[in-house]
Amino acid sequence: MVQTGETRRELALDCCLLAGRLMAEGGAETYRVEDTMERMAASQLMPKSHCSVAPTGIMFSPSDELPTRFVRIRSRRTDLKQVALVNAVSRKLVAGSFSLQEAYEELMAIESTHTAFSFRLQIFAAAIGSGCFLLLFGGAWPDVPYAILIGGIGFIVTDRIERLTRIRFFAEFVAAVIIGTLAYTVIFLGFGEELDGIIIGSVMPLVPGLLITNAVRDMMAGHFVSGLSKGAEAFLTAFAIGAGIALVLSF
């Protein structure tokens, strides 16, 4: 009986930590991750659990007597669908629609089978987004095709270099240099009309809008460690993009 209780408690801990890690990796806000984990723990007879979420790791204590567990967050991206799927599992577990075993298996399935949109679709979205942002910022219609093309190329370069070097800021810097060079070439050859508009539209898919929003939200909620960490990450990304464009324009 004791063994069964310990096994169930370990499964509940694994379930809470897995849900928190998947949400954090998908770009969920800190308060949402902590709230989800604590609600799931409370539904499994752990009402006095404590949870602390940071961009690089999660610490979770089921009670004052039991040891604290830690899980590392190695990658972060924007995947709101993954956040929504984990949210749905947690709600069903808390409501009693899922047993603990079913919830854990569902989370494992989300981790192993859920993938982001295909890379081609991501490129297409980044390219169309670049053209739309150019118009949104008052750019000229004749520059839209160039912004679409250059924005798509910039997105591809960022992904490939990040896969190769595992350093996202370096990948964003190189992509910004290429975007600036291509935009300048288009204007130099007489095809485009406004250099600024093409550059601004093309770099927008690289701008960490969700990260900035989450940083501000975490700071307002009192999660200063997470807020400052995400703010620093967003600042480094913005600096990499700005430095790449400035390097091209300085010549």
Image: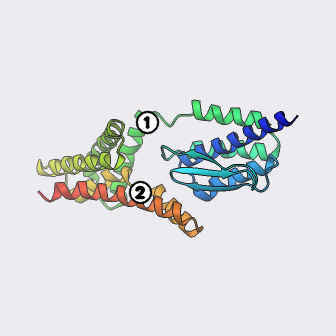
Tell me residue 132's x, y (percent).
38, 52
Which quadrant holds the C terminus? bottom left
Q: Is residue 227 left or right of residue 186?
A: right
The answer to whether residue 194 shows anywhere in this view is: no
Judging depth in this view, the residue of 179 and 147 nearest the camera is 179
Say the numbered circle drawn on residue 233.
2
Q: How many marks?
A: 2
Q: What residue is shown at x 41% (from left), y 61% (from top)? A: 232
The answer to whether residue 177 shows anywhere in this view is: yes
Q: Is residue 202 left or right of residue 107?
A: left
Q: Is residue 188 left or right of residue 157?
A: left
Farthest-out residue, right = 1
Q: Nearer the viewer, mark 2 or mark 1?
A: 2
Is 236 above or below relative to 95?
below
Judging depth in this view, the residue of 81 and 190 nearest the camera is 81
Q: Quadrant location of residue 145?
A: top left
Say the numbered circle drawn on residue 121.
1
Q: What residue is shown at x 51% (from left), y 65% (from top)? A: 216
Is 31 above or below relative to 5?
below
Q: Quadrant location of residue 50?
A: bottom right
Judging depth in this view, the residue of 56 and 246 nearest the camera is 56
Amino acid tagged 1: Leu
Judged from the image, the secondary structure of the residue bearing numbered disc 2 is helix
Judged from the image, the secondary structure of the residue bearing numbered disc 1 is helix
* Mark 2 closeness class: few <14, some 14–19, many ≥20 residues within 10 Å: some
Judging depth in this view, the residue of 137 and 111 nearest the camera is 111
Which quadrant holds the N terminus? top right
Amino acid tagged 2: Glu
Say the numbered circle drawn on residue 108.
none
Task: Give the colour scheme shown.
Answer: rainbow
Question: Who comes first in sequence, dot 2 or dot 1?
Answer: 1
Tell me residue 138's x, y (percent).
32, 62
